[in-house]
Image (spheres, rainbow, N blue to C red):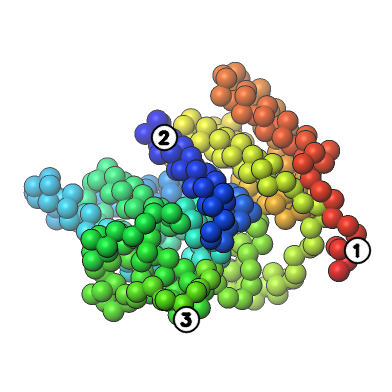
Amino acid sequence: MNELTFPIIFMVLIVMVEALIIARQKQVSFSWQDVVFNLNSGHIMLWLFRGLELFCYGFVVTHFSFGVVDNWPTWLVWLFTLVAWDLGFYWLHRLHHRYRLLWAVHVVHHQGEHFNLSLGVRNSWYSSLTSIPFFLLLALMGVPLTVFMTVSVLHYTIQFFNHSGLIPRFKWLEAWMVTPHHHRVHHIKTGGYANRNFGGSFIIWDKLFGTFSESPETPHQYGIGGEAATENPLIDSNRPFLRILGVKKVNKPIHSPRYHTGKMRLVGGTLLLFTLVIGYVYRYGYGFNGTTLEQVGLFLLLASGTVALSGLSSGQNWGKWSWFVVASMMVLLIMMAGWITPFWLVASTLLWLHSVCVLIGIGSTVVDSDDVQA
C-alpha cells in the first residue's frame, strides 16, 4: 500500500515544515494546539469512511452504470471527470453551508482559527459520508473507480495547498484557479465571507454562480463565531448532531485544565500516533476485505488515541491515564499479533515511553488550584 502511505507521509512532513516556519517568523497568528487538533481530528475514522465512500462508488458503477462514457476517448473521460468532479464539489461545499445537517459535518473544518496547511486536514469524522451523494452521478455515468480515485486525490491535493499560510500570490492563476489568496476569504470569521469562494480547484464556479469575493482590505480573523472547539475530536465531530437532537448537556462548559503539556511533547505525541495511523494504512489499505481481529483492535486503539490525546491537549487528568492505557494496549496488541518488525516495535515503544513521561509529569506544568477555580 505504498501508493497510499507515501502521500500521507508527505502531507504530514510538509504540514510540520510550514508550521515550524510560521512559528519561527511570528508574523501571523499561530497555535501549536491548533496544529495538534488538526492532525488529530480523527484521521483513522476519516479513513474508515473514505473506504466506505469508495465502496459505495464502486458498487454503483459496477451494478447501476448507464455506461454513458464507455465509448468516449480515454482523454475525454479524464478531462470530463476532472471538471465534473470539481463542479460536484462546489455544490457539495455550498450546500454544506446551507443545510443544518450538512453544516453539522462541515463546521469542524471552520472552527480552526489559524490559516495554515494543517487546517487543510482538519475535518469531521463524517466528511466522506456526506460526500457520497454528490459524486454518484459520475458512477451512474460509468466513470471508472480508478479514474474517480485519481481525480479525487488530485483535487484534494490542490485543496490542501490552498490552505497554506506561506504560498505567495500567483495572479496569473487567480483568474481560473482557486489559490490560498481566494480560499482564505472563505475562512474569515465575519462579514458573511464563509458563504463566498466555495470552489475547490476552479474559481470559475464561484464567478459563474455569483459566490465569488475578493479578499477584504481590512484586518480579519479566521474561524466561526459562537461556541469554540473543545480540542476533542469525539466531541467536536458529534456535538453538532446532538445539538440538533436537542441534547442540552452538550452545552456544558469544558473543565478547566489541570496541567499544561509542553508544546513539543504534545506535537511529539501527535506525530507518534499519526505514524501508527500510517502503519494501519500501509498494512490494511481501506480495510474492507478480510477484516481481522487484529485490524479491529488496532483501529479501536488508534481511534481511542485521538480522544486521549485531546485530553492531554486540554490538560485533563483523564487524558494522561487514557494515553498511557492506549499506549500500553498498543504494545500488547503488537506483541500478541506477532508484528515483530522494526517499524511496529520502535513506533509502539516510543509511544509507550512518551505516555510514561506524560503520566509522571515530565514536560508538564501543573496549573495552580486557584487558577483552576477562577
Tell which tag, 3 or 2, sits nearer the viewer: 3
Whole-number angstrom distance, CA of label 1 to CA of label 3: 39 Å
The answer to whether residue 66 of the structure is visible from this angle is no
Q: Residue 45's x, y, as percent?
A: 53, 49
Q: Residues within 10 Å of mark 2 (few under 14, many from 20)?
A: few
Instruction: Give the position of the C terminus as an image quadrant.
Output: bottom right
Instruction: Give the position of the N terminus as an image quadrant.
Output: top left
At 33% from the left edge and 69% from the top edge, which residue is drawn?
Answer: 91
Q: Is residue 363 above or below residue 350?
A: below
Q: Amino acid at mark 3?
A: Gly
- Displayed quadrant of residue 183: bottom left
At 9% from the left edge and 50% from the top edge, which residue is drawn?
Answer: 72
Q: Residue 152's x, y, as percent?
A: 32, 50
Q: Secondary structure at mark 2?
A: helix
Q: Which residue is mark 3?
A: 191
Q: Amino acid at mark 1?
A: Asp
Q: Which residue is mark 2?
A: 6
Q: Which mark is residue 370?
A: 1
